[in-house]
Amino acid sequence: MEPVTEHRAPEPLTEYAQRLIHRVRAFDRRHPLLWDLHFTGFWVTAALIDYVGGGWRHNALSLDVPGWLLLTLSLGLSVPLLWRRTHPSAVLAAMAPVAFANAWTGAALQAALLQLALIYHLALRRPLRDLWWATALVIAPVLVSATRHGEGTWDQQIGSHLMSITVAALIGVTVRTRRNYTEALEDRARRLETERDQQAQLATAAERARIAREMHDIIGHNLSVITGLADGGRYAAAKSPERAAQALDAIATTSRQALAELRRLLDVLREEEKQQPDLTPQPGLTDLDRLLDGVRSAGLPVSTTIHGSPTLSAGRQLTVYRVVQEALTNTLKHGGPHTTAEIELSYEERAAVTVTITDTGNGNGSHTGGNSRDGRGLPGMRERTSLYGGTLEAGPRPHRERGWRVRLHLPEESPQ
């Protein structure tokens, strides 16, 4: 079986030329002086060859020009090109007397055409209004030559030079326009990339804040339940071993649930592993019974009163669940012994709901505990509530009643 050889299509000439131009420009940016020396050296050499070889005689209007003057004119029209990019206006002004001498003597050196390179750089780097005086400065020696030596008609000489100046200026303007357009595209790409990075950072920060809030709710609640169960099991161990065994079973169940939810959240942070997204639903109203069973098993009696039928979206159900969870967690932490809790849920039309959680604990403001200081707890509850335009009130119960009250209200859901 013959080996199969892959035949690559020939590279288009335009792509090859563009890549070559890109390399030349990159070399120019890295070594500008070296490039200027090569450019100037080439034209100085060409001017000297024209002088030494006598080629200037074919276009000269007068052959009685001294050799030293020819050498001076050749160098005066070529050497200043070394500064053509940094000081094009000054270089053109410095070459003007040499060009006038070239026209007056009738030498008519071809090196005078190097002034067109200055026209190009003026159009490329200077304001376009500078082209007016530059054109006059280049045309003036032509008028001197036509007046003094009378070779050819004025319109022929001036017309040909004006055409050359126009072409050089148009090339400079074209390159300048393309360069400005490319720079604008690159600047826009940089700004879009910066904006994209900022949006990604904001999205990452928001996601991490959400994960941190979820971890606080999960870990804080389950650890509070485990602590209550452990305290109860310790007291029951001496008198009722069966109750102690039940407490240990409840601790194990609660720990496994907390670990499973924690693993689910941590999977979101695994950026290096590409796996299927976790489709486990977030807690909702149907999970409140299991939550309350765990709290009751930890030693906190909880009673519930429900008015109406729930018609909440998944996001609103999660908010209600987390607020109830956080309120009961704070009661477990700070309520003290013999504390009881009561939950009242009032469902209204169009997904509006009011939830009131009250307890008979100390009611001395310790429910906020360290939560306000660490940015979680009640602040996290208020963040969840604000997502749906709701209100959250938390504080001691009024009218000298002992305990703490948390009241959540989510308004009607606006129609889409």
Image (cartoon, rainbow, N blue to C red):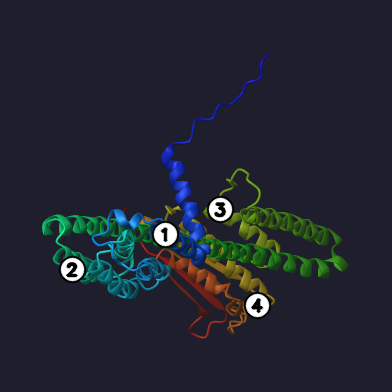
Q: For the point 56% across and 53% down, which residue is it?
A: 282
Whether residue 344 appears in this view of the structure is no
The numbered mark, 3 or 2, whose residue comes first in the sequence reads 2
Tell me the kind of residue under disc 3.
Gln
User: Tag 3's secondary structure?
Assistant: loop
Q: Pointer 2: what residue?
A: 144
Mark 2 vs 4: CB contact within 8 A: no
Residue 305 lies, in percent from the top left, at 50, 62
The numbered mark, 2 or 4, whose residue comes first in the sequence reads 2
| Separation of marks 3 and 1 at Cα, in angstroms | 92 Å
Query: Horizontally, is 256 left or right of 302 in the view?
Result: right
Nearer to us in this view, 225 or 246: 225
Q: Nearer the viewer, mark 3 or mark 2?
A: 2
Tell me the kind of residue under disc 4.
His
Nearer to us in this view, 64 or 225: 64
Quarter where residue 276 is shown: top right
| Separation of marks 3 and 2 at Cα, in angstroms | 91 Å
Q: Pointer 4: what residue?
A: 334
Q: Pointer 1: what residue?
A: 52
Q: Pointer 3: what residue?
A: 282
